[in-house]
Amino acid sequence: MCRVVIILNLFIMCFSSIIAEILNPDFLFMITHAVKAPSGHNTQPWLFKIDGNRIEIHPDYTKSLPVVDTENRELFISLGCALENLCLAAMEKNYESVVTVTEKGVISVDLFPSDTIITPCDLFAQIPVRQTNRSVYNGKRIPRDTISALGNKIMSQNIHIHFYENGTARFDSIKRYVESGNRIQMKDKAFKTELKEWMRFNKKHSEEKKDGLSYRVFGAPNLPALISKPVIGLAINERSQVKGDNKKIASSSHFALFTVKENTCKEWIQLGRILQRFLLITTEMGIVHSYLNQPNEVQALSEQMANALNLKEEYPVILLRLGYGDKMPYSGRKGIESVIIQDSVGGI
């Protein structure tokens, strides 16, 4: 077994060296930052193809979540987040980018070295800093003028963001829908099976996979798999999830709900770009965030919540809780050699 691991590591090192020699290092820089985007269960559902002056971003359906994300909506939002990171990294290397998206969600980014110096975006520095923070926050409220400024920074015809402050009736209404979503999902055997498939139960497991939901992001200790797997498995239940999320919600300042008009693949990708920019802006402000998409993932609840919030002709898609809190451990990321389509390196 040890020999196999050594040989595999040597192959990866050689493959990485070949990639670096053959491909444009600026493009590798862009992809390195693109993969720091968030994704459901940290599945990292993207593949990149380099073709001349173009980088394509393809959905990797082997990383789909058919139970919790039946339409691959969250998958395509993740691709949009990766796209935004890539375009910010392109600016950092003084490239202009032209983006097109096919009906099937394949993204093409044509890249051209600029004749003039492009002023880098300040948000680029936040890409490695941003994280999904699942902890209990400190209860401090985000000032209302900050919330207003955030709303003004995110402008789109078909994509909207709605803020709900802790202590208001609508905040409490959303909290109840999150609880209902938790109860429905935690009673679904298929949902829990899918969730456990993406859990990484200790340090060794996390370092081997470099994806999924690490034990560290839940604050669990590093224990042997024989102990940690059944313990964490037992903790995935309706009562614990409801109690834990209610405590986290109480510590948060606001909910931020992102909605779309058409609910199409192209719109999900565009939402991903807007979402990622929003997350980078809030990171720069010292605001932390985490996802509570349960009511958006259960169609009946999503429709009920939209009606309760008077969201006419809008589909609730992404629900965040916002606040202030301490940094948490970062989720792992696979090396870019595992997400670059082989055609990009001459069939290697």
Image: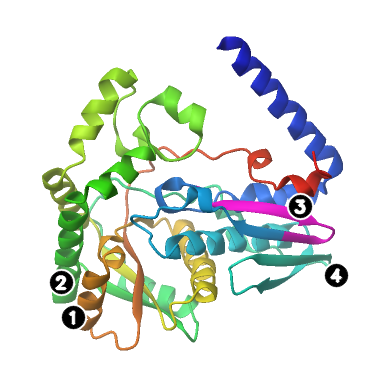
Residue lying furthest top: 2
Three-letter residue code for mark 1: Ala
Residue 109 left/right relative to 247: right
Q: Nearer the viewer, mark 4 or mark 1?
A: 1
One can see residue 255 in this view: yes
Residue displayed at 62% across by 58% down: 58
Q: On screen, 183 above or below 136? A: below
- The reply to whether discs 3 and 2 touch (Cβ–Cβ < 8 Å) is no
The span picked out in magenta is 44-55
Residue displayed at 19% across by 36% down: 235
Residue 15 percent location from the top left of the image: 75, 32
| Circle 2 SS class | helix
Cα–Cα gap, marks 4 and 2: 51 Å
| Circle 1 SS class | helix
Three-letter residue code for mark 3: Phe
Mark drawn on residue 27: 3
| Circle 3 SS class | helix
Callout 3: 10 Å neighbours few (<14), some, many (20+)?
A: some
| Magenta region includes residue 47 | yes
Say which residue label 4 marks: 116
Three-letter residue code for mark 4: Thr
| Magenta region includes residue 185 | no
Q: Nearer the viewer, mark 4 or mark 2?
A: 2
Among numbered discs 3 and 4, the one appearing first in the sequence: 3
- Where, quadrant-wise, is the C terminus in this rendering? top right
Say which residue label 1 marks: 308
| Circle 4 SS class | loop
Cα–Cα gap, marks 4 and 1: 50 Å
Mark drawn on residue 173: 2
